[in-house]
Image (tube, rainbow, N blue to C red):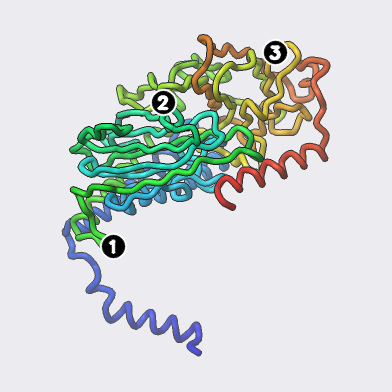
Amino acid sequence: MIGRRDMLALGAAVAAGSGSAAEPPAGSDGEAAWREYLEALEYARAKMLNSTRCRDAGDRTRALYDVQMLSTVGFNMYMAPRRAHPNFYIHPIFMPFEMTWGQPCPDFLYRWAVLSGRNTYRIWGQVGDAPFLDIQVMDGFWGDPSSSNVANVFPGEHADSQGRFEIFLSPDPQPGKTWVAIPRETRNVVLNSREAWWDWEHDRGAKMQIEAVTVVDPEAEWTYTEAEFNRRLREQARWVRANADFNISMIDHIQAKAGGVNVFAIEWDKDLRLGGKDMGGNPKALKGRMVFDIAPDEALVVEVEAPRAAYWSYSIGDIWYQTPDYSYHQSSLNGHQTSVDRDGRVRYVMAQQDPGAPNWIDLVGLTQGFVNFRFYDPKGGYTPKPVIRKVKFAELRAALPSDTPVIGPQERREQLSRRARASLARYGY
């Protein structure tokens, strides 16, 4: 059996004998593309670490984690896709606590696919129990120069009595079929499907598949030409830079729109623009967003009329637009999980420590970050008007109704155990 020392010696010999020959020629396009990619990673690192919002070691660590994550997502969305053989990605884009760039909603199971605008695709499946399921079609991924929303299609609106649906996407009409037009000259047509899980423990998820039925724009089955590889690598680099900029500008936008911290700004997702850019929001989503700043010995009580919407949830993110762990921490609550008080109002308690209140939002160590209060398809013109109070944690109970239930340590442990199992099961774990 070859030993570790022999392996190291063999590796050194190979490197000395042939390593230099594998290097791209100095000044080549391959070398230039690789340098662009490395420079993008450094740009993102410096941009986030030099931000005035980066206050402590925790912020710095989360920023560096985010740079690593953006590199991973860049590979999955630009280097990896084969548009002639698309798949709905789940794990390569979001994971329940390992990969949460872009502040994914803790209730959503997201599916992503990358298509060519010249091909024809078929999506088919069966809807589940979700109160909200859509497929958003985008001209390019977020960060692409062309990035914009093309269409949103809701499979439940096209399903038969058994919940089965079939949808075609192509640049040309598909008579007699449910058809979504995609831009013919766009090489990077991106699908983002959101499926809202309401009862994490008991909901049945949708089944969804995709295939190319007509391929006008084929791609390599495995390896790329050097030129294609370099082009995709540059797309990854652009993605990393764009999202480093987005992370900071989005938090700045929320705070400016609200007029300060610990104040909500309410706007339709479809109306969100940053720097005049369409952010590809969902037309049925109304969102309340708030930048929070809460000391470890403080709590924020957010009181609002019980929402009237097909789906609603309250979740937090950090300043780099990442969702903190929602599997092992109660850092989010949807309408099914939320306790409504006798007066018809909901009171969320944002705090580091467990206050024993039903609607505790665990800050998971964050003293600053933001809230995403989502409402999909709000009813009767409902617009949330939250009332916010910051109190000392020691005085929190006096700020809640006297009949607010007390959740003891054992009950909380059981809640969190069930929550983790249900969250991970959604991803097949």
SS for callout 2: loop
Spatial separation of the CA atoms under disc 1 and disc 3: 57 Å
SS for callout 3: loop
Residue drawn at the location 50% of the way across and 23% of the way down = 376
- Which residue is under mark 2? 282
Front residue of 428/322: it is 428
Residue 330's place in the image compared with 278, above or below, is below
Residue 92's place in the image compared with 382, above or below, is below
Q: Where in the figure is residue 424, as x and y percent of width and height?
A: 60, 47
Q: Is residue 264 left or right of residue 359?
A: left
| Callout 2–callout 3 Cβ contact below 8 Å | no
Dividing the picture into quadrants, the one containing residue 201 is: top right
SS for callout 1: loop
- Which residue is under mark 1? 222
Q: Where in the figure is residue 96, as x and y percent of width and height?
A: 56, 45
Spatial separation of the CA atoms under disc 2 and disc 3: 28 Å
Q: How many marks?
A: 3
Q: Is residue 406 left or right of residue 51?
A: right
Q: Which mark is residue 344?
A: 3
* Residue type of the residue flagged with mark 3: Gly
Residue drawn at the location 76% of the way across and 17% of the way down = 400
